């Protein structure tokens, strides 16, 4: 005898009150065993008891995998640190350096790593030259205007690093513009200015900006403090950088140099 199909609504005990689902069910014919009893055959039944699952298979293992959550975007890595640099990484630093501290040395090494500079122009050779080499410099044109010091650096630097360091002697009368013929027409990745005298360094910075992508200068605020006649190297460098349209950042190092200013490329 054929059986009829009927849509019925059933409330499960496990479902919240009012949450009624519809199922397609078989309805028994009159006179059949069960009479008009509704026999639900195609409904979603509650899961069987835990002991009905196959041995060794937990219910969760038989369910479809959950939709994976949307991963959060991974933030970009921070920029390479400029300062400080772990002093244990220094290979050439001299503990008896009179004008440079570990922090000063580290600021130069850090700036070299930040900029990736390989070809360097330097004013005022010495411990700063060692920091440049420690930082990865492959070619250094270092300039010295005092002959006695030039002889010292020729012995201590050029002869020790003949493939890296070239020493240029120069003179700079106060009434003249700065010119160093072997350097004037060259381009450099970075210029480090640790000489000559502090009051003349702004002109050296302008000279370097015309030839270098980056310019690094100690502010020397502890030895050349701002006064009524001297605004201080930090303020002067800020003005020079603003006029050139180039970014400027400082790394505070404390004694002896006070801080280092790093002037970057235009548009950076």
Image (cartoon, grey):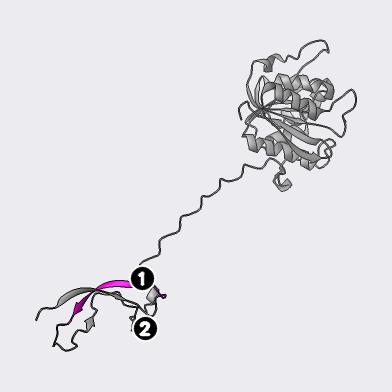
> From what the image shows, is residue 233 above or below residue 108?
above
Q: Which residue is mark 2?
A: 49
As drawn, the residue found furthest toward the top would be 175
Tag 2 secondary structure: loop
Instruction: State the image coordinates of residue 212 (x, y, percent, origin top left).
Output: 65, 24
As drawn, the residue found furthest toward the left would be 1
Give the class, few, some or many, for how many residues have Cα within 10 Å of label 2's Cα (few <14, many ≥20): few
Instruction: State the image coordinates of residue 110 (x, y, percent, origin top left).
Output: 69, 39
* Displayed quadrant of residue 189: top right
Is residue 45 visible in the rendered structure shown here? yes
- The residue stretch that appears in magenta: 16-28
Q: Are marks 2 and 1 in contact (CB under 8 Å)?
A: no
Image quarter of the C terminus: top right
* Displayed quadrant of residue 233: top right
Q: CA distance from mark 2 to mark 1?
A: 15 Å
Choose the circle earlier in sequence order: 2 or 1.
2
Q: Residue at x 83, y 13 (%)?
A: 174
Tag 1 secondary structure: loop
Q: Which residue is mark 1?
A: 63
> From what the image shows, is residue 255 above or below residue 237?
below
Instruction: State the image coordinates of residue 157 (x, y, percent, origin top left).
Output: 74, 30
As drawn, the residue found furthest toward the right would be 228
Image quarter of the N terminus: bottom left
Does the magenta-highlighted stretch encompass residue 21?
yes
Label drawn at residue 3: none
Give the class, few, some or many, for how many residues have Cα within 10 Å of label 1's Cα (few <14, many ≥20): few
Is residue 154 visible in the rendered structure shown here? no
Judge left or right: residue 206 versus residue 2. Answer: right
User: Mark 2 or 1, which is nearer the eye?
Assistant: 2
Judge left or right: residue 258 versus residue 106. Answer: right
């Amino acid at each position: 005898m054929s059986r009829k199909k009927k849509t019925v609504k059933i409330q499960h005990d496990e479902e919240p009150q009012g949450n009624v689902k519809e199922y397609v069910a078989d309805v028994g014919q009159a006179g059949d065993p069960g009479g008009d009893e509704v026999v639900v055959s195609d409904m979603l039944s509650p899961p069987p008891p835990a002991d009905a699952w196959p041995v060794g298979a937990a219910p969760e293992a038989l369910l479809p995998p959950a939709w994976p959550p949307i991963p959060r975007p991974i933030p970009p890595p921070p920029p390479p640190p400029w300062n400080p640099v772990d002093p244990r990484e220094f290979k050439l630093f001299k503990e008896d350096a009179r004008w440079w501290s570990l922090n000063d040395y580290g600021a130069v090494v850090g700036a070299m790593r930040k900029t990736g500079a390989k070809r360097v122009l330097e004013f005022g050779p010495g411990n700063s030259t060692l920091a440049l080499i420690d930082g990865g410099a492959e070619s250094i044109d270092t300039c010295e205007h005092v002959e006695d010091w030039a002889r010292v650096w020729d012995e201590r630097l050029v002869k020790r690093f003949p493939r890296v360091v070239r020493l240029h002697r120069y003179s700079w009368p106060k009434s003249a513009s700065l010119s160093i013929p072997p350097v004037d027409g060259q381009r450099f990745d970075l210029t480090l200015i640790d000489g000559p005298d502090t009051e003349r360094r702004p002109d050296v910075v302008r000279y370097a900006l015309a030839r270098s992508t980056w310019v690094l200068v100690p502010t020397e605020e502890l030895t050349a403090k701002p006064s009524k006649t001297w605004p201080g190297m930090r303020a002067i460098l800020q003005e020079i950088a603003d006029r050139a349209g180039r970014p400027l950042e400082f790394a505070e190092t404390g004694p002896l140099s006070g801080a280092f200013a790093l002037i970057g490329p235009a548009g950076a």
